[in-house]
Each structure stands twice: as structure tokens, then as C-alpha cells.
């Protein structure tokens, strides 16, 4: 256990559905991240929140909408996704935020868009 | 921006041997470099961080070196075990003033009993 939990672990959704991914960290960290990992590709950084403020949006399509109500919780709201959005979505947290530092990852949500 | 290169071919070794994985980067020397382990279908797990002013770092059977002249880091696992089989990722700051780590594709290590 890394201290970062994600729910659900698996999600199948149609292109017209709306769903949300949830991440919670129990480490007292200040920064939280969303990454996308597709087969045979490196981890792609999507969003960064530092002290609940969004500091990075890595040119992510608007069908992905993040929300960070406090330093311990992070959501990724999904709507009208495309089949190419099928991937493993990973949440991470770190203590040092924008200064870098080791990241603690959750187990991920395996998303399939049909 | 930084380009990170890790061998895309799997590394196959026999149990008990030393595994050596390579991470090359193309541009400026990063302030730090990290190594992570990732098992199939799971999130990466942090292993080691080495800073730009450090040549070598050790943790149990793991050793990382950092050569800023060659723009390369080597990751060694001594006395490898089948349980060490996983994908190993290196990560370093993206650049442009950001210290947030960006990840390489990773190299798969398979340790045969």
C-alpha cells in the first residue's frame, strides 16, 4: 500500500456516459497529479494540483475535467470520451509539489471506452 | 524539453546475475533523476533518487549512477531474483523551469530462475 487509493479500479463506459474517477491520499502531501498510461507509451502528465490550485494542464482535451476540493482528494470527471481514451489512469501525490520529489502512485483505474 | 531514452527491448537475465538498465537523456543536465518499478496493471513505485551532484547512490541490492558528461544513468540490481521482474522507469524534470518529473517508457526486466 502506497497511501494513495483510487476508485473504481476498473471502469467501462460508453462514449455518451459521464463518470468520475476518485483519488485519495493519506500521506499529508501537498501536490496531486493525474497521469494517463496507454499501452507501449510513457506516462503522460495530465494535471497537477499544488495546495489545491491547478498549476499544470498539459493540453488535455476538455472532456477531462479535474477537481481538487482539498489537498487529500482529487477527482477526474469524464464525459463524451473517445475509444482512444481507453488507458490506465494513475493518480500520484508528492510532498514537494512544484519542486519535484518522489511521487507516490495509486493502483490506477483501468478505463475502457466502448 | 527533455527527451528520455530507455531501451525498449526486454532485458533477460539469469537469477543471481547483476541486471543493468540504462537511462539516457538528450538535453540539459537535470537537477535529479529518479527510478521507479512498475508491475503490470499497477502504479509505479519509487525506488531511488539521485541528485546532480551525486555520482552514485545505493539501497540494499540497488545501485544508481549518474554521469552528467555522458548524460546517462545506470540502474543496477545485484543478485537478481525472479521477483525483480518488472518494468523499470526513469524520470527527470521536464525542464522549462518545471521540476515535475517526466517519465521514460521503461525497460522490462525478466529474471529467469
Image (cartoon, coloured by chain):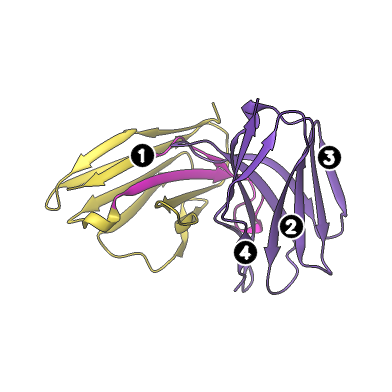
Chain colours: A yellow, B purple
Dot label at residue B4? 4
Element under disc 3: strand
Which subunit holds the residue at mark 3? B
What x and y, as percent, mark residue B64?
79, 47
Comparing marks 4 and 2, which lies closer to the viewer?
4
Residue A88 shown in magenta: yes
Q: Are marks 3 and 4 in contact (CB under 8 Å)?
A: no
Q: Residue furthest left?
A: A16
- Image mark 4: chain: B
Q: Earlier in the sequence, mark 3 or mark 2?
A: 2
The segment highlighted magenta reads: A86-109
How dense is the environment of label 1, judged by Cα within 10 Å: few (below 14), some, or many (20 and up)?
A: many
- The residue lying at 78 percent from left, 51 percent from top is B50
Quick one: label 4, few (<14), some, or many (20+) residues within 10 Å? Answer: many
Residue at (61% x, 69% y) in the render = B3
Front residue of this view, candidates A43 and A26? A43
Q: For mark 2, what is the residue?
A: B32
How far across and how far down the image is residue B35, in percent? Answer: 67, 47
Distance between the Cα atoms at labels 3 and 2? Answer: 15 Å
Name the mark nearer the viewer: 3 or 1: 3
Query: Who's the residue at 70% across and 63% down the image?
Result: B24
Count of picture labels: 4
- How far separated are the C-alphas under marks 4 and 2? 13 Å
The residue wearing badge 3 is: B58
Whether residue A106 is situated above or below residue B25 in the rendered picture: above
Mark 3 → mark 1, Cα distance in angstroms: 33 Å
State the SS at label 1: strand
State whether residue B27 is above or below residue A22.
below
Label located before the other in sequence (3 or 4):
4
Residue at image mark 1: A109
Quarter assignment of residue B1:
bottom right
Amino acid at each position: 500500500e502506497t497511501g494513495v487509493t483510487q476508485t473504481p479500479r476498473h471502469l467501462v463506459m460508453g462514449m455518451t456516459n459521464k463518470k468520475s474517477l476518485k483519488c485519495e491520499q493519506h500521506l499529508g502531501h501537498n501536490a496531486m497529479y493525474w497521469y494517463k498510461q496507454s499501452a507501449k507509451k510513457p506516462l503522460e502528465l495530465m494535471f497537477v494540483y499544488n495546495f489545491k490550485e491547478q498549476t499544470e494542464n498539459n493540453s488535455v482535451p476538455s472532456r477531462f475535467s479535474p477537481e481538487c476540493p482539498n489537498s487529500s482528494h482529487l477527482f477526474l470527471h469524464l464525459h463524451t470520451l473517445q475509444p482512444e481514451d481507453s488507458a490506465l489512469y494513475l493518480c500520484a501525490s508528492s510532498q514537494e509539489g512544484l519542486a519535484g520529489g518522489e511521487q507516490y502512485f495509486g493502483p490506477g483505474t483501468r478505463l475502457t471506452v466502448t | 524539453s527533455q527527451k528520455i531514452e530507455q531501451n525498449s527491448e526486454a532485458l533477460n537475465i539469469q537469477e543471481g546475475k547483476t541486471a543493468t538498465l540504462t537511462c539516457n537523456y538528450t538535453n540539459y543536465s537535470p537537477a535529479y533523476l529518479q527510478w521507479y518499478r512498475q508491475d503490470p496493471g499497477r502504479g509505479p513505485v519509487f525506488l531511488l533518487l539521485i541528485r546532480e551532484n551525486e555520482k552514485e547512490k545505493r539501497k540494499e541490492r540497488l545501485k544508481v549512477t549518474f554521469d552528467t558528461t555522458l548524460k546517462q544513468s545506470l540502474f543496477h540490481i545485484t543478485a537478481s531474483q525472479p521477483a525483480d521482474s518488472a518494468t523499470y522507469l526513469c524520470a527527470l524534470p521536464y525542464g522549462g523551469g518545471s521540476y515535475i518529473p517526466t517519465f521514460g517508457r521503461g525497460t522490462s526486466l525478466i529474471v529467469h530462475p
